[in-house]
Amino acid sequence: MVTSVPRLVIAAPSSGSGKTTVATGLMAAFTARGLAVSPHKVGPDYIDPGYHTLATGRVGRNLDAYLCGPELVGPLFAHGARGCDIAVVEGVMGLYDGAAGEGELASTAQVAKLLRAPVVLVVDASSQSRSVAALVHGFVSFDPEVRIGGVILNKVGSDRHEALLREALDSVGVPVLGVLRRAAPVETPSRHLGLVPVAERGALAVEAVAAMAAQVAGGCDLAALVALARSAGPLAGAGWDAGEALVSSPPPPLPLPSPGALPPDSRSALDGPRPQAPDGLVDAGRPVRVAVAGGAAFTFSYSEHAELLTAAGAEVVVFDPLRDEELPEGTAGLVVGGGFPEVYASELSANEGLRKSVAELALNGAPVAAECAGLLYLCRDLDGLPMCGVLDASARMSERLTLGYRDAVAVSDSTLAGAGTRMRGHEFHRTVVEPDAGSAPAWGMRAPERRVEGFVERGVHASYLHTHWASEPGVARRFVERCRTS
């Protein structure tokens, strides 16, 4: 199979240059002109894809070469872009910035090469004129395999300023595809972990996306951008499919880290062979109900997780811990992903009925998978307010930001993974859980420091680590199997 969907990668020399405004505005502007637009985001970010979804009416999907491996970037892209007229991929950080100490891995540049897609460089021109030529020339020449097909100049001050910038860029031979003037920024408020998610802003988010679309449509050559997108090379290979992923052989395991300074009771898991997922699918004749937390407090989720659960035989039901007073009837398993429970701690605590429902489900041994925000929700308390009390741990806000990719190995058998299973993940939080690990930890890490973290108790797997299940589909199958047997 060959994927030939026209596509663009929106990149920048650094964060803060205007990638999100341009990418989201471009998605919305193309959609307004009747194109079916496939939205994508490089990296682990959960928030930008929410704005992309609002702009296009399609699920925003992440392309992360660290979490999923470079070999899955093309198939996951083809899966999301199936049936679309054009795809827009928003980059992460600066064009060539990737996982720390890993070269180009997980950079926007690597993803652009894997997708054979032209790059549009968004440059903040607010404090430069002729120097823009040196900047763009450097980015064009740094890696000849990355094709920069044009530049969008952001924060341009005047007609004179624009003329100077265009004159400078003529010498580089990179076309100017858009000019955005200095203006009051589109209202996209931020807080401790970035932009406020779409689910929390309602009509204000709709207005913000409309403003981005108007700004981009008014300042960019949309026809030229579509023509550039059509110059992308064909991608060979089939699109990712959840059902096929569940029955396919897992990729070769990465080498396990040496035990080092990990606690003695965790070393056997680190030293042992990696278990292989069982062959074949579970019996899908009777779907089991898996409740997935959603709403404003729990907005962080990769859509492939629900697709894998469904393919494994689950009926996925979304509920809102801020509104629903009990779990959906017949819940056999629970998934509580990331989000901002610290912002809604009072409301979550006040919903005593649901807290008791969650605690009862966990006490009865049902499978529960919790990541980051889900971990906080399962704790005894959060900033002094009662939570579900599933874990004998206390959570609180912190001044310290914990951020970065992680290489992890499961150190305890759980409803998600057998001990020794390797997965890559990402941490992103300003909270602390004390203690940070239970007697049976969830994961062992080797960088940035060697440690264990998280909790495995009864059917509960709770951790700060965000993972992408497409990289290890067996976790979804294992989870659903445990829902059937618990």
Image (cartoon, rainbow, N blue to C red):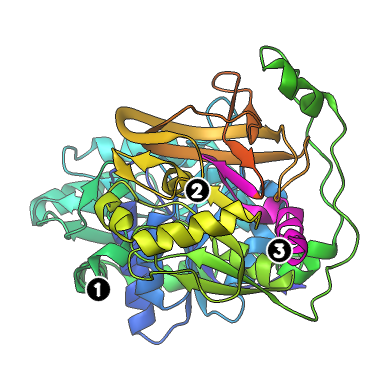
Mark 3 nearby-residue class (10 Å; few <14, some 14–19, many ≥20)? many
Is residue 157 in view? Answer: yes
What residue do we see at 56% from left, 29% from top?
437
Label total for image: 3
Q: Does 469 appear above or below 230?
A: above
Tell me, yes or no, whether the highlighted magenta stretch contains residue 462. yes
Q: Check if residue 371 falls in the magenta segment.
A: no
**What's the mark number on residue 483?**
3
* The N terminus: image quadrant: bottom right
Foreground of the two, 258 or 209: 258
Between disc 1 and disc 3, whose residue precedes?
Answer: 1
Instruction: Label 1, secondary structure: give it.
Output: helix
Element type at mark 3:
helix
Q: CA distance from mark 2 to mark 1?
A: 23 Å
Q: Is residue 92 left or right of residue 143?
A: left
User: Amino acid type of disc 3?
Assistant: Cys
Residue extent of the magenta highlight = 460-486
